[in-house]
Image: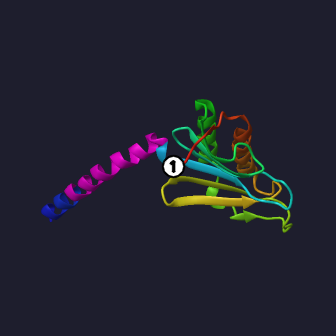
């Protein structure tokens, strides 16, 4: 019986030793953190674009229509803004939100917010006219304002 207990403890210690460093790396490494905001078309001249921000502070904007610059552009966000966004996403109750908060008016643009800290496990919330919960609209507002004030650098694709 003692051999069985000793063997079980040894195997458990081995697996905990293998798993623990990986979890602590994920907690310190923000490169897996990701958030994006996308504004869709309306029946007018609504800006159509998507901004993607990763945990290193690199932002990429895909300007499609009625937005400057058009095409693919990049920018770097400040450490303060990045820390604020990381904190806001960490405190949001993602599992409690609906996938969509839609008004039913087809001529209104939609805002799509995607968030992930674990690759392959992404939360997506689509809303119109500020119908989403406040934490989601506040995150969207932060990223939308980034579109107007970041120093976007156009990228050429070869």
Where residue 106 appears, as percent x and y from the top left, is 84, 67
Task: Give the magenta range.
Answer: 10-30
- Residue 12 in magenta? yes
Disc 1: CA contacts within 10 A as few (<14), some (14-19) or many (>=20): few
Residue drawn at the location 56% of the way across and 49% of the way down: 34
Residue with the mark numbered 1: 158
Name the foreground residue: 109 vs 7.
Answer: 109
State the image quarter where residue 113 is shown. Answer: bottom right
The overriding secondary structure of the stretch rendered in magenta is helix
Name the foreground residue: 28 vs 58.
Answer: 58
Residue drawn at the location 48% of the way across and 56% of the way down: 119
Give the color scheme: rainbow, by chain, secondary structure or one colour: rainbow
Horizontally, is 113 left or right of 54 in the view? Answer: right
Horizontally, is 116 left or right of 149 in the view? Answer: left
Where residue 103 appears, as percent x and y from the top left, is 84, 65
Residue drawn at the location 54% of the way across and 48% of the way down: 157
Q: Quadrant of the N terminus?
A: bottom left
| In the rendered image, the vertical position of residue 96 relative to residue 134, given as above or below | below
Where residue 108 appears, as percent x and y from the top left, is 84, 60
Where residue 44 appears, as percent x and y from the top left, is 86, 57
| In the rendered image, the vertical position of residue 99 relative to residue 30, given as above or below | below
């Amino acid at each position: 019986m003692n051999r069985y207990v000793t063997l079980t403890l040894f195997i458990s210690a081995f697996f905990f030793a293998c798993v623990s460093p990986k979890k602590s790396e994920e907690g310190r490494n923000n490169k897996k953190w990701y958030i994006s905001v996308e504004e869709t078309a309306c029946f007018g001249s609504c800006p159509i674009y998507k901004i993607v921000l990763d945990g290193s502070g690199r932002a990429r904007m895909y300007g499609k229509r009625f937005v400057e610059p058009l095409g693919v552009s990049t920018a770097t966000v400040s450490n303060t803004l990045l820390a604020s966004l990381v904190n806001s996403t960490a405190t949001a109750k993602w599992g409690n939100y609906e996938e969509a908060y839609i008004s039913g008016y087809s001529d209104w643009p939609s805002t799509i917010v995607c968030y992930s800290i674990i690759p392959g496990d992404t939360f997506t919330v689509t809303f119109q006219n500020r119908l989403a919960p406040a934490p989601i609209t506040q995150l969207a507002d932060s990223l939308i304002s980034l579109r107007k004030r970041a120093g976007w650098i156009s990228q050429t694709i070869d």
